[in-house]
Every structure is written in structure tokens, then in C-alpha cells.
Amino acid sequence: MNIDQLQQQYNEQRRQEKRKIFAFQFVILIGLLLLWEVTTHFRILDPLIFSSPRAVGSMFIAKISDGSLFPHIAITMFETVVGFILGTLFGTLLAISLWSSKTFADVMDPYLVVLNAMPKVAIGPIILVIFGPNMLAVLVMGVLISVIISTLVIFSAFQQVNENYVKVMQLFGASKYETFRHVILPASTPTIISTLKVNVGLSWVGVIVGEFLVSSSGLGYLIISGFQVFNFTLVFLALLIIIVLATIMYKGVEMIERKVLEKQ
Amino acid sequence: MTFLDVKNVTHHFFKEQQVATALENVNFSVGAGEFVSFLGPSGCGKSTLLSLLAGLLTPTAGEIQFAGDVEIGYMLQQDFLFPWKTIEENVALGLTLLKRENHDIVDELLEQFELAHTKKLYPPQLSGGMRQRIALARTLAVKPTLLLLDEPFSALDFRSKLSLENFVSETLKQFSTTTILVTHDISEAIAMSDKVFIFSARPGTILKSFIIPQEIRELTPFDARNAPAFQVLFQEIWEELDTDEY
Ligand SMILES: Nc1ncnc2c1ncn2[C@@H]1O[C@H](COP(=O)(O)OP(=O)(O)OP(=O)(O)O)[C@@H](O)[C@H]1O
Ligand SMILES: [Mg+2]
């Protein structure tokens, strides 16, 4: 056999391996749904609490066709994406200002430590009072939850850039801005991108908690309202939609990461 | 003609716990177009002295005088090319920052360094010797009148080191750049320089200077190593450094 054939054989094996894994994954998914359906059907699990895949499915179809689901999905998606972008953006900007003045960074240090340690959702009620029960409060929640941790992670990435690269810039008489643009930013890009991935998850937490509190629209609101009237089919529907959307967003950011890192 | 005059330069590093004196009363001068080398034990302050000359640090005491305007090119102990920029962009860095962007200079240098084919590649794709040459090209692109080289060949295997020595020596003769080379290698210092300064252990000060005879200077660094006068001088410097507890 020649090398080409061996290579083909190797690729074929790899493809088969992948197909096998995918088949297993698919079987597990179907199995879980079946288990859920069967256990609730025979009342091993209380269908009032655990609903059932069929109930969730038919509610999904009903709510899609009467158009009452889409606005909630749109609002939550919008809030999450905006919260995610603003959280990362403000985090990066804050990290830049910390980097540009050592005095400022030293002064801010204890405050950042405290803010980071504080569970952000605990101040949810205060945010609700300050901004009122509207989308703004939810957005603030979504931003707040990711901004401090982004700042800290990105700032520490800035600080870890090899000082000799900075020295090279100094030798050419570079300004602080030029040093940032040519050295600090490109050297920290991988870290900034990996905070993006963390922030996707955090923004979802912030936004859903925000919607719990504001309780006027969005998937978080659907969960809370379903819970209040003991409509757990609605709760599961909202939950499943959140899972799917969050996964899609995470995968999207992963794709951006691959694109950017490839270029580097 | 004196190009650089260093008078009574002393440098301390201040730390919370203690003060470290890196250099004490260093005096020397370098003529225009001269190539001088610094030899001395590890930690005696050679890199510190280069940083002082380059203006990265200010001496605690003493004076550093240049004859007229100088453009300093400083090649650090390692290449420190930016891995996120292409070879071309790396070489052009100084020109970009000094707003003197000029692709011809970059292309010419790469051509001359026989690295034109690496233009669009990134530093990690190059060998150590190639990267060292690119770092030199980056330093030379801004046409420095004073070149500071901090152990530029220390990370290389012996063969690449010898060929790079020849190359650098030839290139600098063309540009007639005044050069200061820091090295641990006595042969390298003799083969490349017009003058060699021997430093004491920390705090560093100049113990002795050796003028390299004309017959060695005329040869390429590689051939210089085989000159009869070379061995004699090597022995002398070796003994000097030995008493210096090298
Ligand atoms: N930034 C600094 N802060 C404090 N001490 C320093 C600093 N830089 C250097 N030193 C000290 O000053 C002395 C001289 O250091 P330097 O790097 O100039 O030595 P060197 O002669 O270049 O050594 P080598 O041959 O190993 O490169 C050393 O003892 C070092 O510990
Ligand atoms: Mg050194």
C-alpha cells in the first residue's frame, strides 16, 4: 500500500470514530427525553412539577404560532448581547486606564478586590430601585456581573506582557499610546478573547437574574411567571430556549476566537 | 575624534531592603566609527551601562556626553521580535514609530541580510540565527550612529555565531557605525573590536583596556582567530580576567 492510501485509510478511521461519538451523543439525548416523557407519563415524577417533553413541545408550537414567544426571546437575546459587549468593552477600557497610570491602579486595587469578591446579584434590588423596573436595570445587571472580573483578568494580562517588548518600544521613543497599540494590546488579545467566552456565561446569569427582579418581559420573566402560577411547562420551555441560545452564543464566540487567533 | 565620553559614571539600584551599586566610577571614551567591546564577569553592570548610554536609565552620578546628535540603536540580550507582527513589520518598527516609514530601507536591509524571502513570515517561523539577524536589521533600519549590542550571539550555536560575526562586522564597516559590544567571549571581543575594556566584578569599573593591533583588525572575525597575534592577546586578557576572579 502506498502513502496516499494509508492517509485515506487514516482519514476514514477518523471519520468513523467521529460518527460513532456523534451517534452515542444523539442516543443519550433521545434517551434522556424518553426517560423524561416516560417517568412523567407514568407519574414516577410528578408531571405538575416536571412537565413533559410533549407538553413543552406543544406549548412551544402554540406560542410560536400565536407569536407570544418571540418578543421574549428577542428581548432576552438583545439584553444578553448588549450586556456581554458592554461588560467586555467597559472591562477593557477600565483595564486600559489602570494600565496607563500605576498610581490609579494602586489606588483602585482594594476597591476592585472588594467589588470582585462581592456577589453582584446581591445588589440587584438596589439596581432595580435606582433604574426602575425596566430594561435598563436588566442591562446594568448584565454588565455589572462581568465588568469587574473582565477588568481584573485583562489588566493582569497587560501586566504580564514581557517588559522587554516594552523596552524595545522605549528605545524607539514610542509614546504610551503607541506602546499600547503595538505591544500591549496584541500581546493580550488571546486573554481578552478568552474573557469573552467567560463573559457570555456571566451575561446570561446577570440578565436572567435581572429579568427575575424586573419581572416584565424576557425568558427570565417567563420562568418567574410560570413558577408563580405553577405552570412548570412554561418554566421548562424558557429554560430549554435559554440553554440552546446560550450554547449558540458560546459557539459563536469560539468561532470568533479561532478566526482572530488564526490571524495572529 | 571623540564620539562618546563617559566620565565618573556611578549607578545604584535602590530597593526597599538595600542599595545595589552596579557601576562605580566608570570612565572611558569611544572615537567615531570605533568598535569597542566590554568584557567582564556576570552581573558586573555591563547591561546597566548600555541602558545608561541608551537613556533608559539615568546615572546616579557622573556624565555621559555625546559629540552632537546621536541616534542610538540598542539590540537587547535576546531578539525580542514581536511575534504578532510579520518580519517586514518588525524590521520597519523603528521607522514607523519615528514617522519615517520607508519600505525601500526595509526591503534593502532584508535583501542585504539575505532574508527577503521571510518578509511575510512571523518570527516563530524563523531559526534563532535568522531572528537575531532580523533583530539587527530592526536596529539598523533607523540608521543609528551609535550601536549597542548586548551579547547578540550568545544564544547561537558556534557555526552560526562565527558567520554572523563576519556578517555584522562587514555590515558595520559599510555603515561606519560606532559600536559597543558586550560579550563573555574573549575571542569574539578580540576578533571584532578595535578596543576591549575589561570590567571588574560588581560594582563594575574599568580595570584595563586593550588596543587591538592593526594586523588583527584588518582581518574578518573568522580569520582573525588564526592570526599569530591573536593567541598572545587572548592569553593576556584571559590572565587579566582570571585575576579578576572571572
Ligand atoms: N532593575 C534592577 N534593579 C535592581 N538591581 C539590578 C537591576 N538591574 C540590574 N541590577 C543589578 O545590577 C548588577 C548589574 O546587572 P547587569 O545586568 O548590568 O549585569 P551584566 O554585567 O549585564 O551581567 P550579565 O553578563 O550576566 O548579563 C547585578 O548585580 C544586578 O543584580
Ligand atoms: Mg547583561
Image (tube, rainbow, N blue to C red):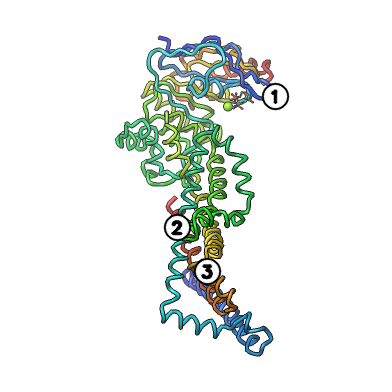
Q: Which of the two residues, B238 or B144, is positioned nearer the viewer here?
A: B144
| Direction bottom: furthest residue | A42
Q: Which mark is residue B17?
A: 1
Q: Residues within 10 Å of mark 1 (few under 14, many from 20)?
A: few
**CA distance separating discs 2 and 3:** 18 Å
- The answer to whether residue A48 is above or below residue B73 is below
Q: Residue A52: horizontal and vertical position, in percent?
A: 59, 83
Percent x, y for residue A80?
48, 61
Label 2 environment density (alpha carbons within 10 Å; few <14, some 14–19, many ≥20): some
Q: Quadrant of the N terminus of chain B?
A: top left
C-alpha separation, residue under disc 3 versus residue under disc 1: 59 Å
Quarter of the rendered image showing ligand 2: top right
Q: Amino acid at mark 2?
A: Val
What's the mark number on residue A82? 2
Q: Are marks 1 and 2 on the same chain?
A: no
Q: Which mark is residue A158?
A: none
Between B38 and A167, the one lying in front of the other is A167
Badge 2 or badge 3: first in the primary sequence = 2
Q: Given the image, on which type of amino acid does mark 1 rest?
A: Gln
- Give me the chain letter of mark 2: A
> B111 or A170, which lies in front?
A170
Disc on res. A221: 3
Residue drawn at x 48%, y 36% is B132
Q: Secondary structure at mark 3?
A: helix
